[in-house]
Amino acid sequence: MVSGTTPVLADLQHLDDEALADVRGQGGFTLETELQLGLDRLSYLDDGQAIQLEGLHLGSSEQDDRGAYHQVRVNIDHGAALNLDYLVTDRRIEFGDVRLAGAPGVGMGGVFFDHSLQGSFRLRAGGVTGGAGYSFDSAYTMTGGRLGYRTNGNEVFLDDVWMDVEALGMTLDLVGTALRLEAPHVRGQWRVGAIRYSDNPLNHGRSRDLGSGDWLPSYGGLEGDYELSTITLIQAGGRRGEGVRLDHEARLNTAGFIYLDDGHPLAFKDISGDFRVNDLRLDVDVDGQGRPALALTATGVDGALSIGALALGDQGQSLGAVNFRFLFQDHIFAGRQYRNAVYLQGGGHPDAGPQGLRLATEWSLPSADLSYTDDGHRVVFSGLQSWGQGDITVNVTRSGERNGTRFYDGLRIGFEGVKAGYRINGLRVGDENAPLQGGTELLLALGVYPAYEFELDGQVTLGPGGASGEGIRLNSDLRVGNGRAALIVAPYDEGAGEVPQKGLWIADLEYEGHVREMTLDVTDEGLALVQGEAWSTLDVGNLRLGDKDSGASFGRFVLERYEQGSVMTVVPGGAGDVCIGGQGSSGASCETSGGRWEARGEQGITVRLKQLLVPAAADGRRNALTWEAHRARDSQGNAVNGSGMRLVLDDIHTSDGGDLDGAGAESNDYGIRTELGVDVYQTRVVKKQNGPDSLGVQGNRGDEKIMDPSAPQGYRYVSNPSVEQAANRPLGFAVQARTRFKELSVRSVDLIHPTGGRQTAVYGVRLQNVDLRANLTATPMP
């Protein structure tokens, strides 16, 4: 249904007899137009329910009252193919809002697309098997592009977009009841000069601020290339009644992707993969709560993605390679069936204004593997599963407080009532078919739990601009409730079917965290995250051993954190050459001192941390650790927080040991500095006692574990391995660590009795000039 149309405007020129006399027989004709089109509303109806594009406009991107220039040269060649050569200048395609007929007063927001195009299109009869189909070739170059999303007068857009695309040998056929579109060879290059943000409605679709003339702030730029092939089937019929069904296959033969921050690159190189979407249905429908929505539901999505090198910094040094294999499909988790569906709705966060996106989302990932390869050594995080359901909101917001909700400049992603979880079955070393081993707790060094179930609310706002120039600025407020996270956990499936996981759990978890003005920048060296201010409270109701719900409890633990100006830097390259158990800067000197020389290669990751723990603030923000035990029980048998005996390490903070900057207070610029060099490397593992191990493999105390695919368990013990055998030592994580601080203080150590009150046991503790160094190697346990 189309309503409220305005006429198409085209400039036709009259030719006199003299001009016509100069016209000779030519192959084809040329059509020139200045096109301007406006529609009040464009509606799509599905089983009586409508989704509407409002304020649809096509015209000039620079002058609102002008049309866009189009030139099309039409020619039919000797092979009866239709050839179109076209030129489009200064065109904007835009709609102001997307609304659902059953949800008045709210919309999904608007989209605008500015561009100039020059290209060609060739159409001929005969599809992939000849007959009644069509074949066509297309090639074009786009310049001066902008693609933006707009809500409530604020917008985020891709600016200065350039694209060059060639798609040859495409075919369109009717196969049974489906339209089959095949693109056997598509290649392209593209570039985004900047990703910009504006909070001024007068700047709509402009790269510079109309008031100051300055460039609008930027998140950075993007560029890439690709070569792929696709097959798409389109059929009528939604999940219920009318609608559309899509089935899609794609093979990504090669691709590259680069994020640029003031010219400094974060590059994903040598990308390849394949993807399949099975039975994707599009319906105008309602979600599980009866809210009108555009429903996208899929029976299955699977694929694999390989990134040959993840390079960071101006030198282009690689952190390593990453591979990801995944399968989304319906599955039962914790006795409940989950599926894969997204219900697009209008409105976003209600306090942000009437425009925005709300995605009522449900997902089910029953099978995935993620692997990391460092200098040819590969570790696979096997059996990744994830599930969840909840609302995700998207708004482009401006800084300010409305109806008690604090907003920040940028793209705001909100979480409302998200109940989700994930878990990892174990590690495999070498490839996906290697024996399953424990060791997922090694992820804790990266801040990732091996298994986690939680309820999430809050928001993350991504704003433009880093510490200087381009980059990303982050403000967030997150709340986690009813959480259960594993610190150490056994596999959920060792081959005989899924079983409840046993381990060490932080259960009955409540978390609230806030981050203000954190900047993320790619520098000449690596990736830098600088916190403006961050504070959080992690309240662990029970630290349990065994079952996550009923295991024995060590009591309650509360960790409060308060930091200002903390910095984390990630740079490519791990520890490099290391002397283990000795001293020396070369292999010979290391072995002479009784050590073992390890050349861990050029790849890997180094993480540098500077944590500035600030003294307690007047509003209660602080660094503290509380342990509570012997709590009373309520009528349901649950422990009552605050009813037991508590030990509190209060007001933990760092300092430089004096007023070094003359500000009248202890300076706090050094903090706790930690450097971690992480590699995947072969590790010497020695048997601790005589006899069989937990898998029945025999060996004596002091024997080395050597990997052997021909052995029943994939390894054996060798008393004095040869050089060839030592080359098959097990892979694991090798970490070189150093932690330093000038002064770390604890204001008091207090005991709090439920009836006797608070008593200070220790009045102040100070640790000074600490320098800790360690070399840790950790391998998965069988």
Image (spheres, rainbow, N blue to C red):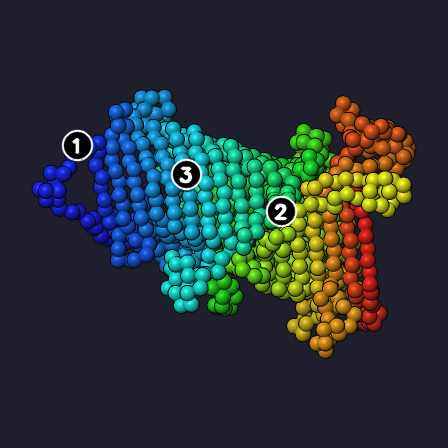
Q: Could you tell me which secondary element the residue under label 3 belongs to?
A: strand
Residue 484 seen from this side: no
**Residue that carries the numbered disc 2 in the rendered image:** 315
Q: Nearer the viewer, mark 3 or mark 2?
A: 2
Using the numbered discs, state the Cα–Cα distance from disc 3 to disc 2 in whole angstroms.
Answer: 30 Å
User: Pointer 3: what residue?
Assistant: 165
Q: Quadrant of residue 306?
A: top right
The residue at 45%/61% (across/down) is 215
Chain-order first, disc 3 or disc 1: 1
Neighbourhood count class around disc 3 (C-alpha, 10 Å): few under 14, some 14–19, many 20 upward = some
In this rendering, does residue 6 appear at all? yes
Residue 419 percent across, percent down from the top left: 57, 50
Is there a contact, CB below 8 Å, between mark 2 and mark 1? no
Q: Amino acid at mark 1?
A: Gly
Kind of residue indicated by mark 3 = Val
The residue that disc 1 covers is 25
Q: Which mark is residue 362?
A: none
Identity of the amino acid at label 2? Gln
Q: Is residue 670 above or below residue 122?
A: below
Circle 3/circle 1 CB separation < 8 Å = no
Distance, label 2 to label 1, CA atoms, is 59 Å
The image shows residue 71, relative to residue 104, as above or below, that is above
Q: What residue occupies the far left of the structure in this picture?
A: 17
Marked residue nearer the N-terminal end (2 or 1): 1
Residue 577: give x, y in percent of width and height.
77, 43
Instruction: Give 111 or 741, whichever is nearer the viewer.
Output: 741
